[in-house]
Image (cartoon, rainbow, N blue to C red):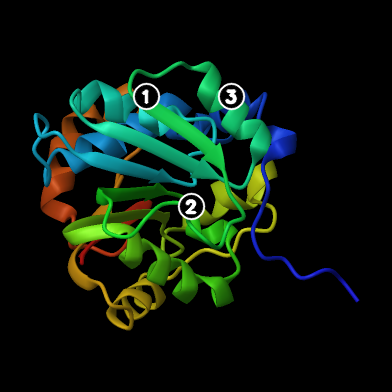
Amino acid sequence: MAEQRDFDNFDEFAKDYRHTHDQSVKMSGASSDYFSEYKIVELLRHENAQAEMTILDFGCGDGNSSVYIRKYFPHASIHGIDVSGKSIEEANAKAIKNASFQAFDGKQIPFQDDLFDVVFTSMVFHHIDHQLHEGILKEIHRILKPGGRFYNFEHNPNNPLTRKVVRECPFDEDAVLLKPSYHKHLINNSALRLEKVKYTLFFPRHKLFKPFLTLENLLSWCPVGAQYYMKAIK
């Protein structure tokens, strides 16, 4: 009998993750760093950049998102957790100011109740067995302060190019993408309150499409963007 897959461990990809991801997203016209940064820019639409917040980067990997959290939220205290110990080593090697990273077991978040203002996660839930999602949301609810916000970015399986990129990406081999309808149901059946669903990345990032990128915010309701995110509140 095959061993049950609870979550994907990225130890084998930790050292070369950015290079591998760059190759996987090459057709988009953007780099791995671009996709890390744009999500934090999206947070700026909802959060005060000058606030002294405590932020958890859940499934932080090599800490690339936290680089941009630090850039755009200079007064935030950042913590990152991931099941990949090798990725945590890469994150700590970045020496991000006022940021700490640690490995965890993938199920129980190693922080006290009511600690975080924001929990941010990017392209993580599709690497976790769906049967564990409910329990993880309970943990996220537990560690958020009252009124704390949860942002979950995911690939959109409604987009055919997204499916192609995921299918051909080495570290997405076992990924099971979250349909937006499933994602909504998951949050609506948790103790969190779903506030917003936004679809993103409608056009390639090649220079030819640059004039169209300003239109993407107007299309954020349309469920065919390459990615999407949900904002929920405790």
Q: Amino acid at mark 3?
A: Glu
Q: Nearer the viewer, mark 2 or mark 3?
A: 2
Q: Residues within 10 Å of mark 1 (few under 14, many from 20)?
A: many
Find residue 99 and report its image quarter.
top left
The front one of 174 and 211 is 174
* Disc number placed over residue 90 in the picture, else none: 3
Q: Cα distance, mark 1 to mark 3? A: 12 Å
Q: Amino acid at mark 1?
A: Val
Name the residue tied to disc 1: 67
Q: Percent x, y for residue 176? A: 58, 65
The front one of 224 and 188 is 188
Report helix, strand or loop for mark 3.
Answer: helix
Q: Residue at x 9, y 29 (%)?
A: 50
Q: Residues within 10 Å of mark 3 (few under 14, many from 20)?
A: some
Q: Percent x, y for residue 8? A: 66, 53
Q: Residue at x 25, y 40 (%)?
A: 54
Q: Are marks 2 and 3 in contact (CB under 8 Å)?
A: no
Q: Percent x, y for residue 172? A: 63, 50
Q: Residue at x 63, y 52 (%)?
A: 167
Q: Give left or right: position of 164 versus 186.
A: right
Can the viewer see residue 198? no
* Disc number placed over residue 110 in the picture, else none: 2
